[in-house]
Amino acid sequence: MAHTEWKDAPGLPDFSLLKRLARDQLIFLLEQLPGKKDLFIDADLMSPLDRIANVTILKQHEVDKLYKVELKPIVSSSDQLCFLIRPRIQTVKWISDLVNADKVAGRFRRYKIIFTPQKFYACETVLEEQGVYGDVTTDEWNFYILPLDDDILSLELPEFFRDNFLEGDQRWVTTAGSALRLLQSVYGSFSKVYGIGRCAKMVYESWRELMEDGEQRTRQPEFAKVFLVDRDVDFVTPLCSQVVYEGLVDDLFRIKCGSVEFGPDVTSSDKSIKVMLNSQDKVFSEIRNEHFSNVFGFLSQKAKNLQTAYDKRRGMDIQQMKAFVADELKGLKQEHRLLSLHIGASESMMKKKTKQDFQELLKTEHSLLEGFEIRECITYIEEHINRQVSMIDSLRLLCLLSITENGLLSKDYRSLKAQYLQSYGIEHLLTFANLRQLGLLEEQQAGETLTVMESKVGKLVNDKTVGKLTDAFSSLAKKSNFRALSKRLALVPKSGEEYDLRVPRDMAYVFSGAYIPLSCKLIEQVLERDGWTGMEEVTRMLNGQEFAVTGGSSSSEARSKTDAQRIVLVMFLGGCTFSEISALRFLGKERGCRFIVVTTAITNSSRLLEALLDNSA
Amino acid sequence: MSRAKPEDDEYWNSSKFKAFTFDDDDDEFSRLKESKRAMNSILVVDDDDDDDEEEDGVERVSWSGEPVGSISWSVKETASSIRSGSERSFPKIDTTPSLSKQGSGYSLSSLFKGDLYDTAVRTYAPELRKPKSDGKTENTSLWSAFSLEKFRSLQDKLLLLDEAVAVYDGNLITAVLMYLKKSLSKEILFQELMARDVALRHYVHYLKEMGEQKLLVELMKALGRTEDMALMQYKEHLNIKDEGQRRDFLKSCLGLPFSQDDATHVQDHYTLLERQIIIEASDKKADAEIFKKFPRKASILNMPIITTLYYSCFYHYGESEGTYSSPANIRKTFRISEKQYILTALGARAKLKSWFDVDSLFNTKNWLGYTKKRSPVGFHRVVDILQKNSAPVNVLQEYVNLIDSPELKLSVALKYKCHDIVINTYRDLKDRQELVVYREKLERDSPEYRKIQELLNNVQIRWKN
């Protein structure tokens, strides 16, 4: 297996500390409302909460009943209600209505809202406007980071992507900055920070500001370098079908907060089972980064070994049997269980993928990445739409086509859009408007040459308002330049070359050897060059916004030999995929360093596109 | 398609695109299936399975699949206890999987003694170090540090806004905008926002979240973003549940300044719903044979155009173009391409097993009066759809034979086990070896098996291998 631990891997910091911090702060906040109380929890906070606390802890702090926030009238006889929510106007409006309904009914209760990870002014104003400010007390639970695994930290904020990139609302910028500050204050400062993207720049600034305000400490750092990257720097990667095991499991079963629910088709029983997928699972940790084609062979071999181990007990006498049961059986049984589970999952994934003609789909994706037989690809996408198969897959292919081709020809755009609306509903014209705004799916503008763009920018540069400049940038951002980038960075290997997936030679293995994730390639290049020097053309095609800053920590020579020097923190703003994480793990192994991924949320093509749909109320 | 066995693995693992196939009879996959059987057959010595599940890293789950003792599970418990009307509290569970690992050995007080932890607390959550607080812990936040009301001149207000934008704090930007909304007239505010894209986007998002549709529309109009305004208004239809009202609303949207393309789509949307309402009203009480044999599972209202066409090909096939519910009428009204029409009609008629209708979809007569089959979509696609609707082999064979490319034809025939075609192709290729291999996959003494047998015994064929 390609990814088993190598010998001199630098040790990773202990992130369980972050869980303890969050738990203790929550307990502290609950104690602010003494006495029995009912707790209402936002649906998307339940899983993260599950990872750091449990019912017993909540009960110890006088939480009586737990409810999910459903924005419907409530049934609770408690005199104290506590709401643990994300700062959303909708939810606060609902709470205000509850309070006002109680007032009308002449019922007296105490109410407390705990916003996490922070409050927003707009939410508090709703309380004021609804006349319940003062009846409701508010607090903040700064639960910024949830460690999902040894090397994955998540902000668990999927809405970051839409809010920031589509709506242009920077409400989460300081949140991301605070998350970095938290990491820095717990684990020490960094020697170097690199980044690319508008949001990355803002997050860096916000983080710097926070550090300047706060107390300065010098601690032995546990990371060497930080890399911040915006999701919109690379949309191609998250739009590709995932074929490494963990990515495939996420695409098909949706891993939620590090845990997945396997249905009866996997468990071969009538029960569903929820399992944690992380490095604790010994079978999973060996296959998670593998290309799916290697997984079968590996699991079969494991199963064979297990069979042999079990068979040893034949012909044992009582003493031997006793020893066997005491020493080996437990381990074997655990492995047996895990192995059965992953074999079941592989089998079920295979069935699902065969059914949807995955092979053909992959071939189309690879052709698009390579810029090869584009007409055939368009025909394939058209038939995909005509047959009304997966609405998200059709959209995904359209977006891939548009990004890789720098937009669609006008007649193709119109025809494909019309057919899409016929197949999946006309209301999707709102979705198309969103995709166009983000530059994910566009019509090529006739005559929109570089000179036009330049004069547009030139005009705006004279105008000193910040807003107009960013406007210019956002319209510039619409050119993806994928083909040129791909050539310059050698993202797509020459066709016809053989690629042995059992012995990956580069990060392209995560996409069957057809494509190196752009995001990861940038990270590799910048780390190699210790900055952006020599990559001017690349950054220009990515619309600039790159930066490299040498950190404040002083004694850089003293640390150079420590493990920390070989740990790189990569923060994805707007989400990252399991394929990217696998690619970075591979890169780390190649270069003798370790990557820690901090992401606003784990994403994949479905989550990314679903965040942009506008087809229901 | 003739690959010799030994090279198999090598080939699939090294070639770029085909490196890994999602194909049921892949070797590795069948090996995996065997492993699965083996796994299931392994007998475990003792049967305390249930007791040590937690230690095995596999969480214990309740009937619904949620881990017992998890928060999500308890929330469901609350919900069900409400339904049953009983007031029982949470089930008492002393350890849960998610906690037992991480929480082991730490008590709250011991946590505070840890060095690293302590420094972390000091910088990150200073309030944790205070003794139990005496009352509210309202944080002093950025915006309450200064009073917005002091900023009264337009210049000051705009400075404030630009300052908020300059520090990238979205929360602050919105806070300032809310103050400007209260203290400036719409016209002035809109005008100033025009030159400030970042602030403008925050304002638009805030209005969306507050549901201030009217103001949003005014804003878009003032900015001259008429297409955005039209879309924003059109979006409102999603909030209307009653189909009649929705139809009327869509009608009112027709005059909005959409782009030319979108105007056509919105017109289609209105026409579609109008037709659907008519069709639904009559089909709800329809008692034709087809409705009894295949009762409708859902209403046709608000379904996409293609779904409506499929429905019409299913229930109203053969009706004259004059009726709204006929396939011909829908096809014409919504300018559906021939290819799209054939695919949809094919799906619907195949579902009903009307092979005659399927045939006539592709039949064309040439000038001599001969019928010939033609299709705007590849026949391999046609076969695909037929197969998914479980067409019998003889129907499948007919269409497999129509596939142009010999390689594609063979691979489709292999996939769907159209033995005759496979055998004839190998015979025409004079490929004796493949025939031998294929024979082994067949049941002994089946007609296909015997056919191969006869061919192999035929001395007149000059095999190439």
Image (spheres, rainbow, N blue to C red):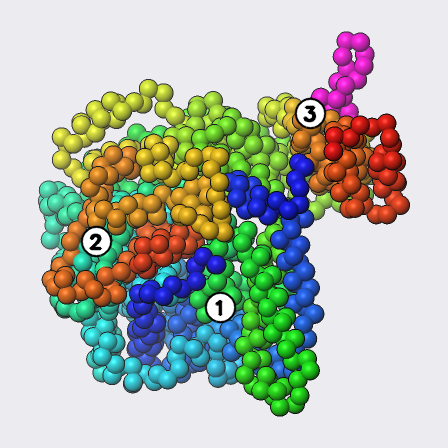
On screen, A1 above or below B256? below
Residue at x 45% of width, y 65% of height: A278
Q: Which residues are magenta?
A: B359-374
- Disc 1: which residue: A281
Residue with the mark numbered 2 = A193
Is residue A601 part of the magenta span, yes or no?
A: no
Q: Are marks 3 and 2 on the same chain?
A: no
The correct choice, above or below, for A307 with respect to A181 in the image is below
Quadrant where the image shows the N terminus of chain B: top right
Going from N to C along the chain, the mark reached first, 2 or 1, is 2
Tell me the quarter of the picture where residue B393 sits.
top right
The residues tagged by marks 3 and 2 sit, at their Cα atoms, a distance apart of 58 Å
Question: Crowding at label 3, few (<14), some or many (≥20) Cα neighbours within 10 Å?
Answer: few
Q: CA distance from mark 1 to mark 3?
A: 50 Å
- Residue A580, given in percent of the width and then of the height, sits at 40, 51
Identified by mark 2, the residue type is: Val
Mark 1 element type: loop
The quadrant holding residue A135 is bottom left
Q: Which residue is mark 3?
A: B404
